[in-house]
Image (cartoon, grey):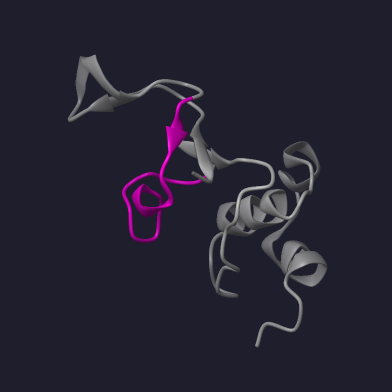
Amino acid sequence: MGFVAIRDIAVGGDSSAFAFRTGDLVHESLVEPEGAYRLGVDVAAREGAKIDRPANNASQAAWAAYAVSLGASADDVADMSRGDLIKMFGGDGT
């Protein structure tokens, strides 16, 4: 699993039941764009996880997660722009 919950995530708005607690592993299929959980809001990439290269128009959070999966520090990429992340980690994009 390539992601980890960065906050407690309640089930259907019920604050007494949680789908994930902070630190729990979250499967890739549950994370945007296919899933409901948002990078940087609900989940973060786990360092060294296998994450596919995002599309050039993907969010900054998706690019930051990809960079972390390649070994970059989450702190280092958090404030980088999407353009800078693509330049540094995107390769040729084809």
Can the viewer see residue 87? yes
Q: Is residue 36 magenta?
A: yes
Q: Position of residue 86 (x, y in %)?
A: 72, 69
Q: Which quarter shows the C terminus?
A: bottom right
For residue 26, side relative to residue 83 (left or right): left
* Residue 19 to residue 45: above or below: above
* Residue 12 to residue 86: above or below: above
For residue 40, side relative to residue 37 (left or right): right
Span of residues in magenta = 24-39
The structure residue drawn at horizontal position 46% and vertical position 24%, both measured from the top left corner, is 7
What is the chief secondary structure element of the magenta stretch?
Answer: loop
The structure residue drawn at horizontal position 43% and vertical position 46%, both measured from the top left corner, is 38
The structure residue drawn at horizontal position 51% and vertical position 41%, both measured from the top left corner, is 3
The structure residue drawn at horizontal position 69% and vertical position 47%, both measured from the top left corner, is 48
Q: Position of residue 93 (x, y in %)?
A: 67, 82
Q: Position of residue 41 (x, y in %)?
A: 48, 38
Q: Is residue 5 magenta?
A: no
* Residue 73 to residue 55: above or below: above
Can the viewer see residue 41? no
Farthest residue, direction top: 16
**Which picture quadrant has residue 79?**
top right
Q: Position of residue 78 (x, y in %)?
A: 71, 43
The number of discs equals 0
